[in-house]
Amino acid sequence: MLHVIGAGFPRTGTSSTKAALERLGFGPCHHMFELMSHPEQVERWLSILEPGPNDWDRILQGYRSSVDWPSAFFWRELADAYPDAKVVLTIRDPERWYASMRDTIFKANVAPLPEGEHPHLSTMRAIRPTLLNMIWLKTYGTGTGTVPTKEQAITAFERHIVEVRETLPADRLLVFEAREGWGPLCDFLGVPVPDDPFPHLNDGDAMRVLLTDMAEGRPVTTPFDASAQEARG
């Protein structure tokens, strides 16, 4: 059951937010990196494309929070499915967000996948033309084989922020930038501020390492591999 739902787009400090939520006791937290590390989850996520209601308890089995796509794309459904969960909308400057997306995720989605049988390649082969393509089409109006224009991307980004703000009551929503640190997040979730520093993970560097690993057919490296969790069945 989810207690915290991340509604922010990728490249908005979602890795830092994942690490922070887990430090505060709201872990495990689902992130796209989890799908890369646990390809056995792919079948659950592809069930979203089938007719009928989504079984979120099964799709997010074992997780207490979620951030980043694919889960953040379904923030409305998750907010309805878990009415007691709070929602964190991670944001950043639109121009800087677009530049980061352009140099990482947009670039990756048009690059051919290399040969190989590493689990992360199996994951991407399964979700890029299906689940991710659907998300891209509904968000940007273009599929994963095409890079959205700057106008398309920033328009979608800003529209999303407005929709989340207008949909959820103020007492259920935190609009959050990772640079703000522990204070707003801990106040919102009603937990003490930890003694250790806020985990400012560099999503850009992590994504560039991941893309290099993928291009060279190596198992991907994520910011969370040092404390890798057991695969969830």
Image (cartoon, rainbow, N blue to C red):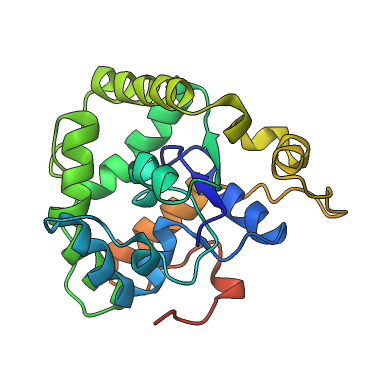
Q: Is the residue 224 above or below the residue 31 in the image?
A: below
Q: Which residue is drawn at 70% across and 38% down?
A: 188
Residue 26 horizontal side relative to residue 149, left or right: right
Q: Is the residue 170 above or below the residue 64 in the image?
A: above
Which quadrant of the figure contains the C terminus? bottom left
Q: Who is closer to the viewer here, 124 or 75? A: 75
Q: Where is residue 167 in the image (x, y as percent from the top left)?
A: 43, 25
Report how many numbered discs are placed on residues in the image: 0
Q: Where is residue 74 in the image (x, y as percent from the top left)?
A: 34, 45
Residue 75 horizontal side relative to residue 230, left or right: left
Q: Position of residue 64 (x, y in %)?
A: 55, 62
Q: Which residue is drawn at 27% across and 43% down?
A: 107
Q: Residue at x 22, y 24 (%)?
A: 149
Q: Who is closer to the viewer here, 214 or 132? A: 132
Q: Where is residue 203 in the image (x, y as percent from the top left)?
A: 51, 47
Q: Is the residue 102 above or below the residue 113 in the image?
A: above
Residue 110 in sight here: no
Residue lying at the far right in this picture: please name it: 195
Residue 143 horizontal side relative to residue 204, left or right: left
Q: Residue at x 13, y 54 (%)?
A: 129
Residue 209 in sight here: yes
Q: Who is closer to the viewer here, 123 or 58? A: 58
